[in-house]
Image: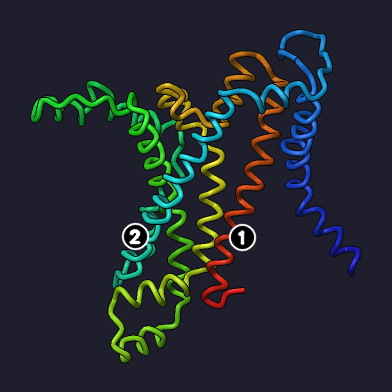
C-alpha cells in the first residue's frame, strides 16, 4: 500500500517536476555556464572568458544605475501596493453582503496581461489621449507623463500596484476575518478610539497576512520588466531601466548573452540577499507584537 501510494504521488507530481527541470533547472545551469563565455547568440564559436563578465558588470555605470532604479521601484511600489490592498480589504470586509462579488471584481486586473494593460495606459497617457486632451482644452496644461523620470517611475509603480492589489487584498481580507471580534469588543469597552484599534489591534493581528503580502510585493519589484518595456523602454534617461530591462538589452539588443547572464546571476544574488534582509526586518517587527 505504501509503495502504491508513493507511485501515485510521484505520478501526480511528475508533470511539475518535469516542467521545473526543463524550464527552470536546465536554463539556470545553461545561464551559469554562459556567464563565463562571450557568446553573441549567433557565432558557432564560444570563447571562455572566465570572470571577466562579472568584473565588467560590477564596474559598469549602467548596472549601477539599474541597481538604484530597481530599489526606487521597491520603495515606491511596495508601500503603494500594500496601501491599496489594505484599502480594498477594509472596504470589502465592511460590506454587509456580496463580498465575494466585489473581491472577484478587484481580482480581475490581476488576471489581465501586462502587455495589454501597458498598451491601454500608454494610449490613455499619450499626447492625444483623453487625459492630455482634457488638460490642454480646459487648462492649457501640457504634461509628458512618460517623458518625466519621476512621473514615469510612479506611473509604472501605480499601474503594477493597481494590478496586484486585488490579489493581495484576498490575502489581507483572510487576515481580517481571522481576528476574533471579542478583541474589538474588549477594546471598545476600554474606550479605545477607532484609530487606536486599527493601529494597535488590526495591524498587529494581521501580521501573517501582511508578512506574506510584503514579501510577495518585494519579489515583484525585483522582476519588473513588461510594463517598463512597453511604456518607456527603460527611459527617459534610464530612469526606469531596471535589472530585467538591462539584462534584456545586453542579451538581445547588444547580443552579449554571456555578459547578460553574469548580470542576471549578480541580480539574483542581490535579490536573494535583499529579500532576506527585508524578511528579517518584518519578522523583527512581528516579534515586537508577540509573533514568533
Q: Secondary structure at mark 1?
A: helix
Left or right? Give the position of 50 relative to 138: right
As drawn, 20 above or below 134: below
Quick one: label 1 or label 2, which is nearer the N terminus? 2
Horizontal and vertical percent position of residue 133? 16, 25
At numbered mark 2, what does the secondary structure look like: helix, strand or loop?
helix
Colouring convention used in this rendered image of the protein? rainbow
For disc 1, the neighbor class at 10 Å (few under 14, some 14 to 19, many from 20) is few
Q: What's the residue at 48%, 76% (across, down)?
A: 178
Query: Quadrant of residue 55 in the image?
Result: top right
Q: Horizontal and vertical percent for residue 15? A: 75, 46
- Tag 1 residue: 280
Question: Between 17 and 201, which is closer to the camera in this rendering?
Answer: 201
The quarter of the displayed image where residue 200 is located = bottom left
Q: Nearer the viewer, mark 1 or mark 2?
A: 1
- Graded by Cα atoms within 10 Å as few (under 14), some (14 to 19) or many (20 or more), the crowding at tag 2 reads some
Extreme residue toward the left, this view: 138
Horizontal side, residue 264 vs residue 238: left or right? right
Write the residue at 82% across / 59% down: 8
The residue tagged 2 is 87
Distance from label 1 to label 2 (Cα)? 25 Å
Q: Is residue 90 above or below residue 63?
A: below
- At a point 51% along the width and 65% down the height, the residue shown is 209
Quarter of the image with the N terminus in it = bottom right
In this rendered view, identify the residue nearer to me: 189 or 85.
Answer: 189
Location of residue 201 in the rendering, given as x and y in whole percent from the top left corner: 41, 77
Q: Which mark is residue 63?
A: none
**Quadrant location, the C terminus:** bottom right
Residue at the image point whose x is 78% and y is 40% from the top: 21
Amino acid at each position: 500500500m505504501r509503495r502504491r501510494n508513493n507511485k501515485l504521488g510521484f505520478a501526480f507530481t511528475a508533470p511539475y517536476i518535469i516542467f521545473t527541470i526543463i524550464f527552470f533547472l536546465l536554463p539556470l545551469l545553461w545561464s551559469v555556464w554562459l556567464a563565463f563565455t562571450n557568446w553573441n547568440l549567433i557565432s558557432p564559436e564560444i570563447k571562455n572568458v572566465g570572470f571577466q563578465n562579472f568584473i565588467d558588470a560590477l564596474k559598469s555605470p549602467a548596472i549601477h544605475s539599474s541597481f538604484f532604479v530597481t530599489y526606487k521601484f521597491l520603495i515606491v511600489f511596495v508601500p503603494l501596493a500594500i496601501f491599496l490592498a489594505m484599502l480594498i480589504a477594509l472596504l470589502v470586509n465592511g460590506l454587509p453582503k456580496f463580498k465575494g462579488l466585489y473581491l472577484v471584481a478587484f481580482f480581475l486586473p490581476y488576471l489581465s496581461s501586462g502587455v495589454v494593460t501597458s498598451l491601454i495606459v500608454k494610449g490613455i497617457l499619450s499626447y492625444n489621449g483623453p487625459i492630455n486632451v482634457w488638460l490642454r482644452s480646459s487648462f492649457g496644461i501640457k504634461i509628458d507623463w512618460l517623458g518625466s523620470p519621476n512621473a514615469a517611475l510612479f506611473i509604472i509603480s501605480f499601474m503594477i500596484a493597481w494590478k496586484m492589489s486585488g490579489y493581495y487584498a484576498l490575502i489581507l481580507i483572510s487576515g481580517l476575518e481571522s481576528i476574533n471580534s471579542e478583541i474589538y469588543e474588549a477594546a471598545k469597552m476600554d474606550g479605545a478610539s477607532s484609530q487606536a484599534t486599527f493601529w494597535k489591534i488590526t495591524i498587529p493581528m494581521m501580521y501573517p497576512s501582511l508578512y506574506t503580502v510584503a514579501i510577495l510585493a518585494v519579489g515583484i519589484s525585483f522582476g519588473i520588466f513588461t510594463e517598463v518595456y512597453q511604456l518607456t523602454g527603460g527611459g527617459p534617461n534610464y530612469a526606469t531601466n531596471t535589472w530585467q530591462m538591462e539584462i534584456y538589452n545586453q542579451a538581445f539588443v547588444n547580443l552579449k548573452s554571456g555578459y547578460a547572464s553574469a548580470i542576471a546571476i549578480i541580480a539574483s544574488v542581490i535579490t536573494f540577499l535583499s529579500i532576506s534582509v527585508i524578511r528579517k526586518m518584518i519578522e523583527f517587527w512581528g516579534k515586537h507584537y508577540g509573533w514568533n
